[in-house]
Image (cartoon, rainbow, N blue to C red):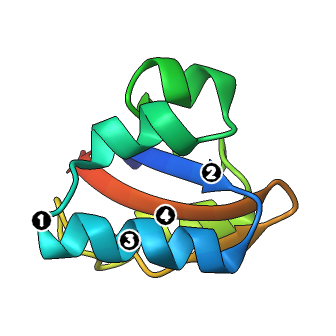
Amino acid sequence: MATAAARHILVETEEQALDLKNKIESGDAKFEDLAREHSKCPSGSRSGGDLGTFGRGQMVREFDEVVFSDLPIGQVSDVVKTQFGYHILEVTARG
């Protein structure tokens, strides 16, 4: 079974997600710091957005499509909308 490790930031609006993504990509802020400060995911905000390792199909479809795509490890994803809100993702490992 394919596995991956990732971290994410979950917010309520696309605008907020884009703003956080821009801060990370410009080097103005670290992913984990913004996750702790802004993510509305309780477990993710405590761990700097770290979701640990999971298998394909364990996350919502939109999330899986990004994590198991060809997104380079360490690169921040485009904004991903799910029923929970707007995410930015960073794959930290694949196996």
Mark 2 / mark 4, whichever is N-terminal: 2
Which amino acid type is marked by label 2? Leu
Task: State the image quarter where residue 11 is shown.
Answer: bottom right
Image position, residue 77 (x, y; %): 39, 74
Name the residue beneath numbered marker 2.
Answer: 10
Measure the C-alpha gap from mark 4 to mark 3: 7 Å
**Residue 21's disc number:** 3
Name the residue beneath numbered marker 4.
Answer: 88
Image position, residue 93 (x, y; %): 21, 46
Which amino acid type is marked by label 4? Ile
Do callouts 2 and 1 mark residues in contact (Cβ within 8 Å)? no
Write the residue at 50% across / 78% down. 18
Taking the image as shown, residue 75 lies to the left or right of residue 66, namely left
Mark 2 / mark 1, whichever is N-terminal: 2
Badge 3 element = helix
Mark 3 / mark 1, whichever is N-terminal: 3
Badge 4 element = strand
- Circle 1 Cα neighbour tier, 10 Å, few/some/many (<14 / 14–19 / ≥20): few
Taking the image as shown, residue 2 lies to the left or right of residue 58, namely left
Q: Quadrant of the C terminus?
A: top left
- Circle 4 Cα neighbour tier, 10 Å, few/some/many (<14 / 14–19 / ≥20): many
